[in-house]
Image (cartoon, grey):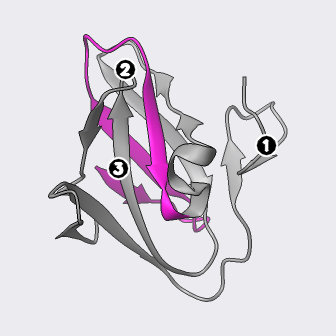
Amino acid sequence: MIESTTQGEIVFRVHRPNARRVELVASFTNWEEAPIALEREADGWWSITLQLPPGDHEFQYRIDGSEWLGDFAAHGVRLNDFEQWLGLIHIPAQHAEVVVRRAAAAPPVRVGARVA
């Protein structure tokens, strides 16, 4: 599921309590080239908060490196050429760059940089 914050950020969340790793792969990460690792929450949810560039974006969650999962709670979905569902998201023009916010005390990390 995705949520918009009052600061214009998007929170990506997926419930996969038995997963070892969950990544966000998207048009803004060049898909598999620079996936973004989500952080595990205590209740089986995984999440990451991003500030995205303006425009239309497609994304999926990649679970444990092999399961690709669309997000039906996004702004929309579409079936890709591999017959997999992609989540769709539209970002209005006022947002200018991709920033990953890990924690309140941590500095932002631009998408494309390696995130530990």
97 lies left or right of 2? right
The part of the chain drawn in magenta is 1-27
Identify the amino acid type marked 3.
Gln
- Where on the picture, by quarter, is residue 53? bottom right
The Cα–Cα distance between marks 3 and 2, rounded to whole angstroms, is: 13 Å
Q: Which residue is mark 1?
A: 113
Q: Which mark is residue 13?
A: none
Residue 64's label in the rendered image is 2
Label 3 SS: strand
The quadrant in which residue 74 appears is bottom left
Q: Label 1, label 3: how many angstroms apart (C-alpha)?
A: 19 Å
Label 1 crowd bin: few (<14), some (14–19), many (20+), radius 10 Å: few
Q: Quadrant of the C terminus?
A: top right
Query: How far apart are the two marked residues, 2 and 1, measured between alpha carbons?
Result: 21 Å
Q: Is residue 54 above or below residue 41?
A: below
Nearer-N-terminus badge (2/1) = 2
Tell me if residue 6 is in the magenta stretch.
yes
Residue denoted by label 3: 60
Which amino acid type is shown beneath numbered disc 1?
A: Ala
Q: Amino acid at mark 2?
A: Asp
**25 over 47 or under it: above or below:** below
Q: Specify the farthest residue to the right.
A: 107
